[in-house]
Structure formats: C-alpha cells, structure tokens
Image: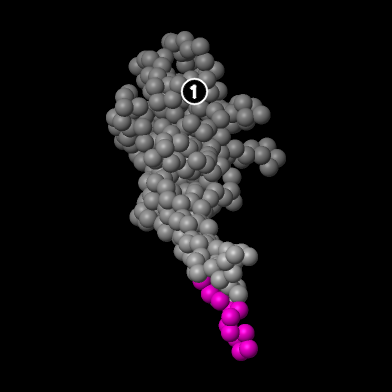
C-alpha cells in the first residue's frame, strides 16, 4: 500500500428535508387541522481515527464526500427520515485543517476519536407548527436548511516515542530492524527509506516504546531538497530525537549541527525536544582503541547495530528519557 500523508478533500453534509403542508382528512372529518410532518435532518460527515490505518491513500483518491439528505415530512404528522451519516476512517495522528479559514479543526491522536467535520442541515417544520388562533389552516411549511460544506486538508503525523534523525546511510533502518520486529528496506545507497517506518522496541518486563525511522535528511531538506520536508512533519510528535551519525564522517560536530539546523528551520520548537546522539557503525573501527577526535556538548552513545555493540545500553538510555 502506498504511503500518503497529505491530501485535500471536500466534504458536504446532507441538506435537511422540507416540512410538509398537509391537512387531516378522514371520513366525517372533512376539514381537519394541519398535520404536516417535519423534514428529517441531513446526514453528518464524521471522521473517526483508526489505529489499523497507516496511510491516507484511500482518501486521496476519493476527493468529494456528500452525506445523504434528510427526507421531507409527510402528512398525518409523520416526520421525514434522517439522512445517513458518512463515516470516514483516518489514521491515528491525522490533523484536520480548514483550508479556507487556515485553522486546525481537530487533532486525531486517539484510537476511536471522532470529529463531526460538517453537520447536516436541520429539517424544516411542517405546517402543524404554524397554526394559530387567527390562522387555523396555514398553507406553508419551513424548508430544510443546507448542510455544512468545508474544504479540508488532512495531514498525517505518525505517533512515535523516538524519532531517528540522520543523513542517508547513517544506519537508522539497520538499528530499527535489529531492536524491533520492523523490517525496513536496507541497502548501501541514499534514500533507501522512502516512507517512515515504525517499530515497537520491547525491554524489561512487558515494557516497550515506539521508534520511527524517518527518511534520511540532506542539507536544505527544510526547503524541499532531497526528499524535502515531506517527512519532517513526522518528527514533530516524537518525544525524543535520536541523532544518528556515521563514525566515519569527516566532521561529526558539523554533521550534527547541520542536522539540528535543518530541524529547527522547519520547526523552531524541535530545538528544545530531548535528544541523544548516536555514533553508528562502530564495527568499522577498532572499538578497543578508538578515541574520539571531536567534542560535542551532547549526550553521546557509540553503537554498532551489526555487532549489537552498546545496543542494550542505548535501549535503556532511551527508556530512561521516556520515564
């Protein structure tokens, strides 16, 4: 299934049914009073967050949603049937935005959470409501109201505790495959990871956290270069950022500051999010005699996903931050 995390749609609630103009007629009662029933309310357009969904693909190819109109009222005081609601399932973590007003309407962060994006129009009153002492045979009824209409943008931001940040081939996918059941594509070329991958990392007695492998950044990503900023939004929800830097990088501090700069240019709040720095691929150097030739004012952990060097320590370090 294709990963889609941004799409725009139109939603239109159902119109209310018209009220009915009717008068009671039966044998021996030739001139009964008004008995026009009310129109039914129009159907609503409702979103529901579903933890089983991980993409907006289905919605992307169904751009317009229209709920059912309410039925008109009938004689003998019979109200019209309410129009059926439309229920749209979306992944947990989806933001619902009003495009015309440029405001966020809902942030769907819990499984089963619902939001009425467009409310159905009220049904019109039948003529039974308009009888008075001076007008006992009202020959008019109220029409139903139009249902709500709104242009929406749906933006999926995955929910994870830990976000892996690094340049392509920094070892993010390899780490995720080693410490979780996730199986991201791994190869020795840039942009192997084309979609965010989630993995559940289990530790201790029935404890776990969710880690997200974000597609590799490059300098200028916040401007749309490389894979651009299309995946940076997924970092915003994570509780911890894990910066991953290849031990073979020529200038590790410069690499770290470039990564941090790309994040903060995209969203300044990311600068204040808790973070750890992972120096990866320690299997490519002599770990016993390795001495860093750099300084960095950050908490640093040296790991190798291939040999599992310090992997347990990394897991418990992250768990400690989450506590």
At 41% from the left and 28% from the top, the residue drawn is 166
Q: Say above or below: 40 vs 8.
A: below
Q: What residue span does the magenta drawing correspond to?
A: 20-32
Residue 140 point in image, percent of width and height: 49, 66
Farthest residue in the left direction? 225
Farthest residue in the right direction? 205
Q: Say above or below: 117 vs 275.
A: below
- Image side of residue 39 versus residue 217, left or right: right
At 61% from the left and 89% from the top, the residue drawn is 27
Residue 303 visible to the viewer: no
At 46% from the left and 60% from the top, the residue drawn is 15
Residue 306 point in image, percent of width and height: 47, 34
Farthest residue in the bottom direction? 27
Residue 322 point in image, percent of width and height: 62, 29
- Image quadrant where residue 58 sits: bottom left
In the picture, which quadrant includes the C terminus? top right
Q: Say above or below: 162 vs 54.
A: above
For the residue labelled by badge 1, is the local secondary structure a helix, a strand or a loop? helix
- On whether residue 104 falls in the magenta region, the answer is no
Residue 291 point in image, percent of width and height: 47, 13
At 39% from the left and 22% from the top, the residue drawn is 265
- Image side of residue 169 versus residue 182, left or right: left
- On whether residue 31 falls in the magenta region, the answer is yes
Residue 250 visible to the viewer: yes
Q: Say above or below: 16 vs 298.
A: below
Camera-side residue of 44 and 320: 44
Residue that mark 1 sits on:
269
């Amino acid at each position: 299934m294709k990963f889609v995390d941004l799409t725009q749609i139109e939603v239109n609630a159902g119109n209310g049914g018209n009220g009915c103009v009717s008068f009671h007629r039966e044998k021996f009662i030739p001139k009964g009073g008004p008995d026009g029933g009310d129109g039914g309310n129009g159907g609503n357009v409702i979103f529901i967050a579903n933890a089983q969904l991980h993409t907006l693909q289905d919605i992307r190819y169904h751009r317009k949603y229209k709920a059912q109109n309410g039925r008109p009222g009938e004689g003998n005081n019979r109200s019209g049937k309410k129009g059926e609601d439309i229920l749209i399932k979306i992944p947990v973590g989806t933001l619902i935005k009003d495009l015309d007003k440029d405001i966020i309407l809902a942030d769907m962060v819990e499984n089963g959470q619902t939001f009425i994006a467009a409310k159905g129009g009220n049904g019109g009153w039948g003529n039974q409501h308009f009888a008075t002492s001076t007008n006992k045979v009202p020959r008019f009824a109220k029409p139903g109201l139009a249902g709500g209409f709104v242009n929406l943008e749906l933006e999926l931001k995955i929910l994870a505790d830990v976000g892996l940040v690094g340049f392509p081939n920094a070892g993010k996918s390899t780490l995720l495959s080693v410490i979780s059941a996730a199986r991201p594509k791994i190869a020795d070329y840039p942009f192997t990871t084309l979609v965010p991958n989630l993995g559940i990392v289990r530790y201790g007695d029935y404890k776990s956290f969710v880690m997200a492998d974000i597609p590799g950044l490059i300098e200028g990503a916040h401007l749309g270069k490389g894979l651009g900023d299309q995946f940076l939004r997924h970092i915003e929800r994570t509780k911890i950022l894990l910066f991953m830097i290849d031990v073979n990088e020529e200038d590790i501090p410069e690499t770290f500051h470039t990564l941090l700069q790309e994040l903060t240019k995209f969203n300044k709040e990311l600068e204040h999010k808790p973070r750890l720095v992972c120096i990866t691929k320690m299997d490519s150097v002599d770990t016993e005699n390795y001495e860093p030739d750099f300084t960095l004012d950050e908490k640093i952990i040296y790991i190798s996903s291939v040999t599992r060097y310090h992997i347990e320590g990394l897991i418990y370090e992250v768990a400690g931050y989450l506590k």
